[in-house]
Amino acid sequence: MSLRTTLSPEKLAELAAEGKAEAARSPFVNPDAVAASKKILRERGEVWAASVLMRDLSRRSLALPQYPWLEDGELETLILADRAEWDQLAAAAQGGEAR
């Protein structure tokens, strides 16, 4: 069973902007970001990723058809959203406010 993100649309928009800015820093794709996003996609699933990116992920990667086609900055956005959800869980577990 795949779950959707628990992050607010405002937080997702913020993370998408951060992801695009991070990707724009280099003309090359960061191989560490590719590896991390592949791991996140395997663990959380494409339903979660689609809810984070707020779009359909049915288009497939040409290089790796088992993964969806991702636009510039979306690798980074998935990584940032994964981290934000873990931070949200940790804050809730400690009795703090969710971010």
Image (cartoon, rainbow, N blue to C red):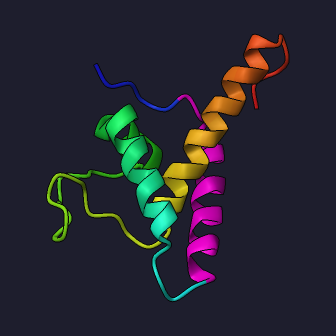
Q: Main secondary structure of the magenta part?
A: helix
Q: Is residue 16 visible?
A: yes
User: Which percent across, then down, holds residue 21?
Assistant: 64, 73
Q: Is residue 10 above or below residue 92?
A: below
User: Which percent across, then down, holds residue 86?
Assistant: 64, 30
Q: Is residue 56 above or below residue 7?
A: below
Q: Quadrant of the N terminus?
A: top left
Q: Per the image, is 74 magenta?
A: no
Q: Residue at x 26, y 63 (%)?
A: 69
Q: Is residue 74 visible?
A: no
All told, the count of numbered labels is 0
Q: Residue at x 57, y 70 (%)?
A: 20
Residue 13 found in image quarter: bottom right
Q: Nearer the viewer, residue 55 or 25?
A: 25
| Span of residues in magenta | 6-25
From this viewpoint, which residue is outermost toward the bottom? Answer: 27
Q: Quadrant of the C terminus?
A: top right
User: Which percent across, then down, holds residue 23?
Assistant: 56, 74
Q: Nearer the viewer, residue 78 or 99?
A: 78
Q: Is residue 23 above or below residue 75?
A: below
Left or right side of 60 for 83? right
Q: Residue at x 50, y 62 (%)?
A: 33
Q: Per the image, is 16 magenta?
A: yes
Q: Residue at x 25, y 56 (%)?
A: 68
Left or right side of 42 for 98? right
